[in-house]
Amino acid sequence: MSSILDIDLDYFNLIENPEQRLKEILDWGNHRITFVVEKHHKAYSRWKDRVKRGTLTPPSHILHVDEHHDMMDQKRYLNIANFMYHAMRTWRNCRVHWLVDHAIDSPDMWLDDDVWESFSPRFSVGSDLPYRWPRPDLVSICTSPDFVNKDLLQRLLKTTEGFMTTKQITAIKMKNNG
């Protein structure tokens, strides 16, 4: 079983020292950024693809660093608001920790009672890294440009450069300047 560190840069909107906090989380993970997406549900699609191809074992742990829990509906079709619901439904032994400093709500408000009852033993929330959480085998970053102001986004992307390949850095710079 594998572990995923999933970071949505919108998490850093309300953080006092966002670049420092991002660096702390990436240092803890001690793993290069595997890929960067703009829409968060695209990360889930890429995780599933890697599991299907056999380059990632089904995850047993997802550390979900995000301003939102991303379990706001149970719609069949994947979207930015429900992809963590799909991840927990797909990988039934996977534990998810939602790392958030100021939770604005809870998944139990959005999910059917029976669904939340099955998810809640595997779901935790808090502002600290969970004790003895396994280091990641994959790190995904979501830029969420519609939810992060451009200045903060640029500063956070600069912070991630030490955890990316030259090819990734070049692709992001071309996208942002092109």
Image (cartoon, rainbow, N blue to C red):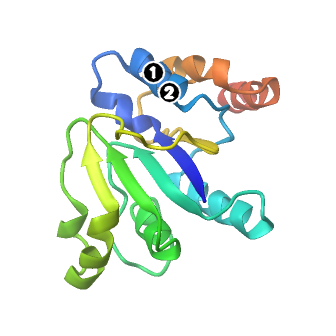
| Residue at x-position 45% and y-position 75% | 89
Examine the rendered structure and indicate whether residue 77 appears above or below residue 58.
below
* Number of numbered markers: 2
Alpha-carbon neighbours of circle 2 within 10 Å: few (<14), some, or many (≥20)? few
The residue lying furthest to the front in this view is 132
Residue 140 at what x, y percent from top left?
59, 43
Q: What element carries label 1?
A: helix
Closer to the camera in the image, 79 or 64: 64
Q: Residue at left 24%, top 77%?
A: 117
Amino acid under disc 2: Trp
The reply to whether residue 127 is visible in this rendering is yes
Few, some or many residues within 10 Å of mark 1 (<14, 14–19, 20+) = few
* Residue behind mark 2: 28
Residue drawn at x 50%, y 27% as measured from the top left: 28
Q: Distance between the residues labelled 2 and 1?
A: 6 Å
Residue 40 to residue 172: above or below:
below
In this view, 133 is above or below 57: above
Residue 82 lies in quadrant? bottom left
Mark 1 is on which residue type? Glu
Q: Position of residue 176 (x, y in %)?
A: 65, 28
- The N terminus: image quadrant: bottom right
Determine contact: label 2, label 1, CB under 8 Å: yes
Reading the image, the residue beneath label 1 is 24
Residue 20 drawn at (x, y percent): 42, 15
Q: Residue 139 carries which label?
A: none
Q: Which of 110 and 64 is in front in this view?
A: 64
Q: Which of marks 2 and 1 is in front?
A: 2
140 relative position to 20: left or right: right
**Image side of residue 97 versus residue 165, left or right:** left
